[in-house]
Amino acid sequence: MTDAPRVVIEVAEGVLTATLNRPEKKNAIDTPMIEAILAMLERADLDAGVRAVALRGAGSDFSAGMDLNELLASADHALEANRAAALRFAEIFARMRRIPKPAVALVRGRALAGGCGLATACDLVLAAESATFGYPEVQRGFVPALVMTLLRRAVGEKIAFDLAATGRVLSASEAAAIGLVSRVYEDADFEEQAGEVLRALATSSATALALTKQQFYQLDGLPFEEGLRLGADVNAVSRTTPDFRAALEAFLKR
């Protein structure tokens, strides 16, 4: 398994599926995997044939978090080296937001710690009913520091602090109830239902989705009236796109 790629990539029908590929380690995230994910996101961004990105785990889990052996070794590293490593992992979260294509986490099994962070960084999180989510870093003397920026936005202040400070693990339905998960499907139907969501995204207007995603994250922290002005700008631009004209003309001809 040492020579196996950390991330396996498949492109079909406009969807780039990236599979975290360390099933024997519960898809633990190490430096080579971080680099592979970043390379995958760059490929997805540059490939015009890719309309959506799906991130999933090989085997029975999405990802149980960071590689503990690598983390333990980092205790002997200098502060600047550890900061650089943390920023490299954080770059995944930033690029998830920057790419104009929707990123979807397909979660079976455990999504914990840094693995839960990867899922949270995606635009949509689709979960099998038996999946579990959590940030148990505090139970290992660590801090879910990088993901807190995402987590606080996703679920609000009180719930985010609860999850970060207690490390409690949530069922998929509990995670959906607080806004950490977008949709939950029965295990037996998960692949079919998730595939339908991905197909819908891949066949939607790429321009409209890109503008939607860009505006959505630009709204972070904007005052109400500035948000409306941003919406007016995006509204105006969207009316000038070829996708808008073609879709509206086709609808009116029905």
Image (tube, rainbow, N blue to C red):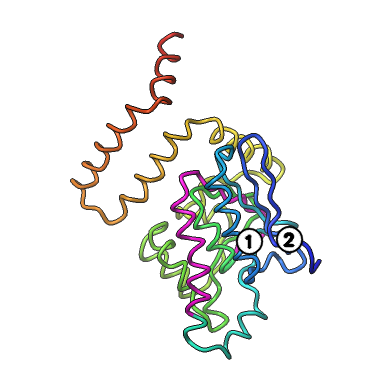
Question: What residue sits 27% from the left and 31% below the top?
Answer: 236
Q: Secondary structure at mark 1?
A: helix
Give the image quarter of residue 137.
bottom right
Q: Where is mark 1, residue-wise?
A: 36
Question: What residue sits 44% from the left and 8% below the top?
Answer: 253
Give the image quarter of residue 134.
bottom right
Most distant residue in the top direction: 253
Q: Position of residue 212 (x, y in %)?
A: 39, 40
Q: Position of residue 99 (x, y in %)?
A: 47, 49
Pointer 1 and pointer 2: residues touching (CB < 8 Å)?
yes
* Circle count: 2
Q: Which residues are magenta?
A: 83-111
The crowding category of the residue bearing disc 1, from other C-alpha atoms within 10 Å (few below 14, some 14 to 19, many at least 20), is some
> In the depicted view, which residue is nearer to us: 221 or 42?
42
State the quadrant of the N terminus.
bottom right
Q: Cα distance, mark 1 to mark 2?
A: 8 Å
Q: Secondary structure at mark 2?
A: loop
Horizontal arrangement in the rendering, residue 248 relative to residue 180 (left or right): left
> In the depicted view, which residue is nearer to us: 187 or 216?
216
The crowding category of the residue bearing disc 2, from other C-alpha atoms within 10 Å (few below 14, some 14 to 19, many at least 20), is some
Most distant residue in the left direction: 225
In the rendered structure, does residue 84 fall within the stretch colored magenta? Answer: yes
Q: Where is mark 2, residue-wise?
A: 5
Indicate whether 41 appears above or below 197. below
Q: Position of residue 129 (x, y in %)?
A: 63, 50
Most distant residue in the bottom direction: 76
Question: What residue sits 71% from the left and 66% below the top?
Answer: 26
Indicate whether 209 appears above or below 128. above
Horizontal arrangement in the rendering, residue 6 relative to residue 202 (left or right): right
Amino acid, disc 2:
Pro
Amino acid, disc 1:
Ala
In the rendered structure, does residue 52 fall within the stretch colored magenta? Answer: no
